[in-house]
Image: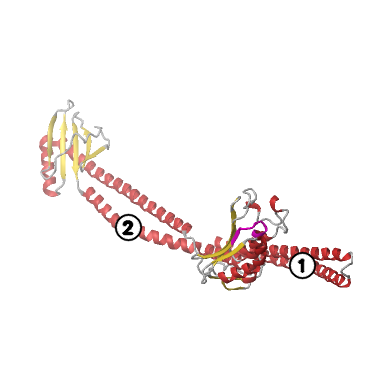
Amino acid sequence: MSSAKGERRDWRFSLRLALGVGGMFAVAVAALYFGAGALLERALAHEEAALVMDRREDVRLAWQDAGDKGLADLLTNLEATTGEQLAVRVERSDQSVIFDRATANAPEVPWAELRAPATGGGNGVSTAGGWTATVLLASSGDTLRVARFSDVPGDVRTAYRGLFAKAAAPLLVAGIIGGALLVVTALRPLRRTVTVMRHIVRTGDWAARVSPPRGAGEMRNLAEAFNALLERQQRLVEGLRQSLDSVAHDLRTPLTRLQVALESGLEKTGPASGAREALIDSLEEAQRVQATLDTLLDVAEAEAGGMKLRRETLNATALLAEVAELYEFAAEEKGAVLEVRAAPSVEFVGDRARLRRALANLVDNALKYLGEGHTVVLSAELTQREILLRVEDDGLGIAPEDLPRIWERLFRADRSRSAPGMGLGLSLVKAIAEAHGGQAEAHSTLGRGSTFLLRLPRS
């Protein structure tokens, strides 16, 4: 079911949801970066600690076997065979240094920052500037400090950051695009449901249904439940229509017979008969009841979504001119002026008879409370999606406390109770506007006049 031409779709919720999914994906990518980085740091630290612990044992044995000479030979051998960068410092119990040497290829050792606690057999390590150091308390009471330098952890960290930076952008783009596609796909059944609902509101076609998505799931359950609701509502509306038809037939038939009988009685009654006035009054009341019944049924039918419209392309200026012509003599009797202000090319789609009746009700309502020298202006304005039909007057206006209630059935303000009417005209206007998929609005300033507006879709 396609949406009406010109109908605006609101994508704000879909956009927020897509951005939310993309944001969550970005958070997940950031968490992956920091989580993997933390694991990598732990693995590198563990590996460096294991290597320096191995060298600590070699240093202990060299010191135990040959003292300073053993340590010097160990460092020379490591430099020549493995290229390893190692430093050893031996301190007395009074912290005086008796040996401090490193391989020739090693950078300066920041011993002041490498202060792991001295333990007999512990594995405490400290790190600073690429150095990983450990401490061993020898049996002689001397403290052996062993430090190993490696630029591999730094290179690995740099490579990890570079690799992740290169992969993060494509991952984020893929996540946002994937999230948007996921949102669009997931919300498609909801958009179909909204389209069907708008179609029903616009046309009154209760036979419209939502196509359930394939497979099982919440969206299919939603579509099936919505269709079941529409099925029940359709039965209720059809039952209401049948009831209205029955009520209309049952009431209109005796009213028609009553009017025929009254008219027949008038024909048989002479002008001088005293019963003639009573017959005339009875006939007028019967016609008034007939009009009230017709209006009530039209309002009920429209509010139930059952008002049938004969849509056609209308010229707004011509429509307003018809209504103005219809009330031209009534305006002259009141001493009021009727004006039509609309461009000749203003066209839209609607039911001519229904809209003419709605505008006529508004003009009739305005003329009831106008005095001599006042004006009623009928105008039309075309926007991108709507046609605005206005009926404005410069009369008494409507009290602020009455304005919200003027669309209610049978409501009449205190100041209007002395004027003829049933209190159904504005209710019918509102019902006709909503049957066209639009709305009726009223704006008024007490003592300065009122403006009634029919806001209708162009198509």
Image location (x, y in percent) of residue 358: 64, 64
Magenta stretch in the rendered image? 366-376
Name the residue: 80% across, 66% down. Answer: 251
Tag nearer the camera, 2 or 1:
1
Question: Mark 1 is on which residue type?
Answer: Ala
Occupied quadrant, residue 136: top left
Query: Mark 2, residues whose alpha carbon is within 10 Å: few (<14), some, or many (≥20)?
Result: few
Secondary structure at numbered mark 1: helix
Is 228 on the left-hand or right-hand side of 174?
right
Q: Is residue 31 magenta?
A: no
Is 338 on the left-hand or right-hand side of 287?
left
Name the residue: 82% across, 63% down. Answer: 281
Q: Nearer the viewer, residue 38 or 251?
A: 251
Name the residue: 10% across, 37% down. Answer: 69
Q: Can residue 152 be seen in this view?
A: yes
Quadrant of the frame with the C terminus: bottom right
Question: Mark 2 is on which residue type?
Answer: Ala
| Residue denoted by label 2 | 169
CA gap, disc 2 and disc 1: 70 Å
Image location (x, y in percent) of residue 397: 62, 53
Disc marking residue 248: 1
